[in-house]
Amino acid sequence: MCTHIVMAETADDVHFKYTLRADERSRMFKPGYRFPNAMTYKELCAFVSQESHKAGFDPLRPRVVSKLRILDYVKFYCVHAREHPDQSRQAKGLEPATSKRADRSDEATRCLFTSCDFEMRVRRSDQEDVAAQMSHDELIQLKENRKFQWYVDSPEDSKKEGRNIQKDCHCFTHTGHVRRTFPLADVTSEIRDRIRQLATNNVSVASIQSSILDEFKKMLSDHQVRFMFQVFCFKF
């Protein structure tokens, strides 16, 4: 990962820029990457967010853009890139708030929502056919129940499949916001032994995470710690 922080005269002019590259933490961030297993749409979204966590970033949001509700591809974008319009009562045409807490005219918290251009397009393999057009309920059922092979789109795949070549369908650079999470680590044998020791003393999942971070300088997700509980046959 390549990180650049451009300093300026004032704090308001500081710009953050992080380019994600396929590395040992996650090989997913590159054109042509093949996902290891067949997954439903919901499993795909969970997998992509987990890989983003591994690189030390927030989850990525999915977007299916299709008027016909065809699940050909999914765009994943940065959680900070949401449009966040003025939420003040004045902008909504409401009476001024009687409580200072309810008054949102000072929108300092909107700084978390930026014009970050991070985007990644994940395509469904065309080995299995789906209906050319679906109802809303049919699309929901497809997302929840049907597994597909997925891959990160690339010009080579576009050419091979006879599609229009999408040269700029990805942007692996986060801009305009700081990193807010620790990169997730793999569970080594030493970490596994430590989890076993803590679990036998009925230590909570959150406390185990804190202990591992303090002792090994590694961050584990709730899922990773709970999976270890299952391995050790503990109820949580």
Image (tube, grey):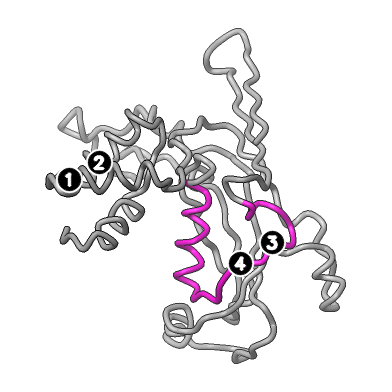
Q: How far apart are marks 2 and 1 (CA)?
A: 6 Å
Q: Is residue 97 magenta?
A: no
Tell which tag, 1 or 4, sits nearer the viewer: 1
Q: What residue type is labelled 1?
A: Ser
- Are circles 3 and 2 on residues that touch, CB within 8 Å? no
Question: Helix, strand or loop at disc 3?
Answer: loop
Q: Which amino acid does label 4 sit on?
A: Phe
For mark 4, does the 10 Å Cα neighbourhood hold few (<14), some (14 to 19), or many (20 or more) residues? Answer: some
Q: Distance between the residues labelled 4 and 2?
A: 30 Å
For mark 3, does the 10 Å Cα neighbourhood hold few (<14), some (14 to 19), or many (20 or more) residues? Answer: some
- Are circles 2 and 1 on residues that touch, CB within 8 Å? yes
Q: Mark 1 points at which residue?
A: 204
The residue at 56%/10% (across/down) is 10
**Left or right of 119: which side holds 234?**
left
Instruction: State which quadrant residue 216 falls in.
Output: top left
- Are circles 4 and 3 on residues that touch, CB within 8 Å? yes
Q: Name the residue under label 3.
A: 33
Q: Name the residue under label 4.
A: 35
